[in-house]
Image: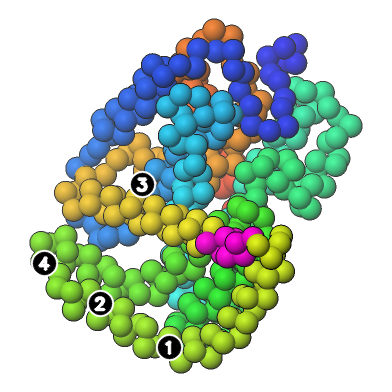
């Protein structure tokens, strides 16, 4: 019976025989905008980059990602094409905020149990979400029981084969590992930031997946914000208070930072230039090809991602100046990771009824995704508490 209600596709897919026109798409955008506006509430004055503000930033990011993946599923139909290329900049927001949070967390709490707890926070909800996908959909609904065992193996070996969005799980765990190693060296903050950005360069020039390369500097950039958070927050508060910044006050801290890094940077510069030229020469398909196009592409994507992150961060901080926050975006931000884990599965498996207006079916899908994320979060909290108690007792 369930086979008649659900269908399966290897890539993101929604039934395209529904009413997906610009009017229904515009109605969807309008309703989402209204939900954000009516959820605005007065709040107490908060410092820039508070937990509430970062949650709203994550809320904006996950909302764009969900709509972006819907647009991919519908091949950018109509106005959805406007969001067709906003996937990687939105992921950049998550990476910047992850770098910011991880750096501050280590500075405050140290490395004790950092690796195990961080991995648990990412991997446990991932395992729970993918187990649900395999058992509920593959085993019971789709009756594809022959592939269940291989799917469980791929959960640990190749997560992206279960859901193409799960590349993010491997990527964020990669940065956690790198951060743990760098902080274990007990270097100064400027050295830590330098090695994080050096890792970003290596990711950018390596044969890594395109999704990695497009966001190779976002996590290090978030760590840089955290390392300089006191100064950055002071400047932001001064700016929000109405003080007009002078050029010297803006560029003097940057100049000091540059002087701090210059010796280490010079040490690696010559070696990096040689390696860079060797790499672009090997990657060049022919002597007449533009061998620098891959480098330009990497730099352009990273600049776009980080710039978009700064735009969203600045927008939410500006709302904070007027003591306003969006409870809707805050809800999405608090559940952003769980929303990310479940939305792809439901997008590929939820069957749209033929002839139903896109706006209606989108919000049916969106509500189911939100409810599923809440269930996943509560289940994850229960399992995580049990495991953490076991670790503490041991």
Instruction: Indicate the secondary structure of the residue bearing disc 4.
Output: loop
Magenta residue span: 289-296
Q: Position of residue 130 (x, y in %)?
A: 69, 41
Answer with the quarter of the image where residue 231 lies: bottom left
Q: Along the polypeptide, which appears first: circle 4 or circle 3?
A: 3
Q: Along the polypeptide, which appears first: circle 4 or circle 2?
A: 4
Q: Going by the picture, which residue comes out furthest to the right? A: 146
Q: Nearer the viewer, residue 331 or 171?
A: 171
Q: Nearer the viewer, residue 326 or 178?
A: 178
Compute the Cα span from label 3 to label 2. 29 Å
Locate the N terminus by quadrant. top right
Instruction: Kindly check if marks 4 and 3 are in contact, taking CB atoms under 8 A apart as contact.
Output: no
Pointer 2: what residue?
A: 251
Pointer 4: what residue?
A: 244
290 inside magenta stretch: yes
Identify which residue is drawn at 23% across, 65% down. 236
Pointer 3: what residue?
A: 56
User: How many neighbours does mark 1 have within 10 angstroms: few (below 14), some (14-19), or many (20 or more)?
Assistant: few
Identify which residue is drawn at 49% across, 42% down. 85
Compute the Cα span from label 4 to label 2. 14 Å
Q: Is residue 127 above or below residue 275?
A: above
Q: Is residue 188 above or below residue 135?
A: below
In the drawing, what numbered circle is on residue 262? 1
Q: Nearer the viewer, mark 1 or mark 4?
A: 1
Locate the C terminus by quadrant. bottom right
Q: Nearer the viewer, mark 1 or mark 3?
A: 1
Compute the Cα span from label 1 to label 2. 16 Å
Identify which residue is drawn at 57% across, 87% down. 270
Q: Along the polypeptide, which appears first: circle 1 or circle 3?
A: 3
């Amino acid at each position: 019976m369930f086979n008649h209600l659900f269908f399966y596709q290897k890539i993101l897919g929604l039934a395209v025989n529904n009413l997906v026109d610009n009017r229904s798409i515009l109605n969807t955008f309008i309703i989402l905008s209204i939900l954000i506006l009516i959820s605005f509430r007065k709040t107490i004055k908060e410092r820039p980059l508070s937990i509430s503000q970062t949650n709203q930033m994550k809320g904006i990011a996950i909302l764009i990602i969900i709509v972006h993946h819907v647009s991919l599923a519908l091949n950018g139909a109509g106005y959805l094409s406007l969001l067709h290329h906003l996937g990687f900049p939105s992921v950049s927001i998550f990476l910047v905020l992850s770098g910011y949070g991880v750096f501050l967390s280590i500075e405050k709490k140290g490395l004790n149990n950092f690796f195990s707890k961080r991995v648990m926070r990412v991997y446990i909800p991932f395992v729970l979400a993918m187990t649900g996908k395999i058992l509920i959909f593959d085993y019971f609904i789709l009756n594809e029981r022959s592939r269940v065992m291989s799917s469980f193996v791929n959960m640990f070996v190749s997560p992206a084969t279960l859901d193409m969005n799960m590349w993010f799980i491997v990527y964020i765990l990669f940065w956690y590992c790198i951060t743990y190693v760098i902080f274990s060296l007990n270097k100064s903050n400027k050295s830590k930031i330098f090695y994080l950005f050096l890792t970003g360069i290596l990711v950018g020039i390596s044969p890594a997946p395109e999704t990695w390369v497009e966001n190779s500097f976002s996590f290090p950039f978030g760590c840089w914000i955290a390392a300089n958070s006191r100064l950055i927050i002071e400047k932001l508060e001064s700016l929000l208070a109405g003080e007009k910044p002078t050029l010297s006050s803006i560029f003097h801290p940057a100049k000091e930072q540059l002087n701090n890094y210059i010796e280490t940077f010079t040490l690696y510069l010559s070696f990096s230039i040689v390696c860079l030229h060797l790499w672009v020469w090997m990657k060049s398909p022919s002597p007449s090809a533009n061998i620098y196009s891959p480098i330009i592409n990497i730099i352009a994507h990273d600049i776009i991602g980080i710039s978009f992150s700064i735009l969203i961060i600045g927008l939410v901080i500006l709302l904070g100046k007027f003591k306003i926050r969006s409870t809707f975006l805050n809800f999405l931000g608090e559940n952003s990771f769980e929303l990310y884990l479940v939305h792809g599965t439901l997008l590929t498996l939820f069957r749209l009824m033929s002839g139903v207006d896109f706006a209606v079916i989108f919000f049916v899908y969106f509500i189911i995704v939100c409810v599923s994320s809440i269930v996943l979060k509560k289940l994850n909290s229960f399992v995580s508490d049990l495991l953490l108690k076991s670790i503490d007792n041991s």
